[in-house]
Image (cartoon, rainbow, N blue to C red):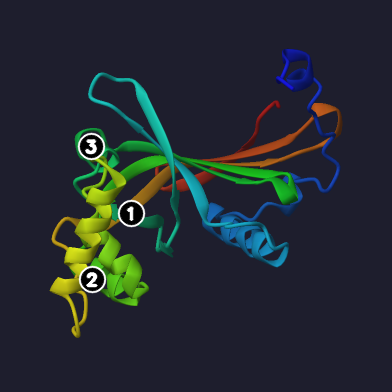
Amino acid sequence: MSLTNEQLAALRVDYALASFEESNALPNPFDQFKTWFEEAIKAQVNEPNAMTLATVKPDGTPSARIVLLKGIEGNAFTFYTNQQSAKANQMHVKPNIALVFCWLELQRQVRIEGVVSKINDADAAAYFNSRPRKSQLGAWASPQSNILASRAELEARYAEAEKEFEDKPVTKPPHWGGYAVEPHYIEFWQGRQSRLHDRLAYTLEQGVWKISRLAP
């Protein structure tokens, strides 16, 4: 059976789980994010720290993929990756990026826009040392975003890393590290009935977060 446009058009959900009013919004968007994030964990949302990372290619076209949030440090959201990957190269050239969290089980979305920068190597090493050993070896094995001749090539590189670090701790690769996103815009979206969704946007203006309601 082939999928039709009519079937796609008929896919819809009327959101009715909750509302998000200005009276319930915390003054600081990081506090509000942590509150929603904790509720996502309690609701057993599948991988609540999964977020879309959108970057800009050198030709100005967008590029997006899923990465995992690994910390909220001060006024920044942090994640880790290969710093020779396509996304890393794009961020180094154009540090203006966007993040999106989608928690369908709670009918919620959070959009973040800001500037990304590398975190210090000591903090990246501390996180790397907390990772499972197989993930550490994978960081050495994968030339992320480069073309591979086959799956066998990747598995051979992994076997080489296993041999290299046999009977000793796996050190952080010099090309692997973390990034911190300092936002200037954070939007909280709560699905509502009749598509009259709640959208509260926090905008940083001269060091102060201003809250505005946006039309859905």
Q: CA distance from mark 3 to mark 1?
A: 28 Å
In the rendered image, residue 42, in percent from the top left (x then y), is placed at 70, 67
Q: Nearer the viewer, residue 161 or 149?
A: 149
Q: What is the tally of numbered marks visible in this picture?
A: 3
What mark, if any, has residue 125 been given in the picture? 2
For badge 3, the amino acid type reads Ile
**Residue 116 at x, y = what percent?**
31, 45
- Identify the amino acid type marked 1: Ala
For the residues labelled 2 and 3, the Cα–Cα distance comes to: 27 Å
Q: Is residue 204 visible?
A: no
**93 displayed left or right of 27:** left
Name the N-terminal-most of marks 1 and 2. Answer: 2
Name the front one of labels 1 and 2: 2
Decide: few, some or many residues near mark 3? Use Cα within 10 Å; few <14, some 14-19, many ≥20: few
Which residue, given by chain and number where applicable, does mark 1 sit on?
A: 180
Q: Say the numbered circle drawn on residue 147.
A: 3
Q: Is residue 146 visible?
A: yes
Residue farthest toward the front in the current orientation of the protein: 152
Mark 1: give few (<14), some (14-19) or many (20+) Cα within 10 Å.
Answer: many
Q: Secondary structure at mark 1?
A: strand
Q: Name the residue type under label 2.
A: Ala
- The earlier-in-sequence mark between 3 and 1 is 3
Write the residue at 20% across / 85% down: 167
Residue under the image location 18 percent in, 84 percent down: 168
Tell me what residue is drawn at x 82 percent, y 38 percent: 15
Local secondary structure at mark 3: loop
Under tag 2, what secondary structure? helix
Q: Left or right of 199: which side holds 159?
A: left
Closer mark to the observer between disc 2 and disc 3 = 3
Q: Earlier in the sequence, mark 2 or mark 3?
A: 2
Q: What whole-number distance in Å separates the C-alpha atoms at marks 1 and 2? A: 15 Å
Compared to 25, does 186 lie above or below? Answer: above
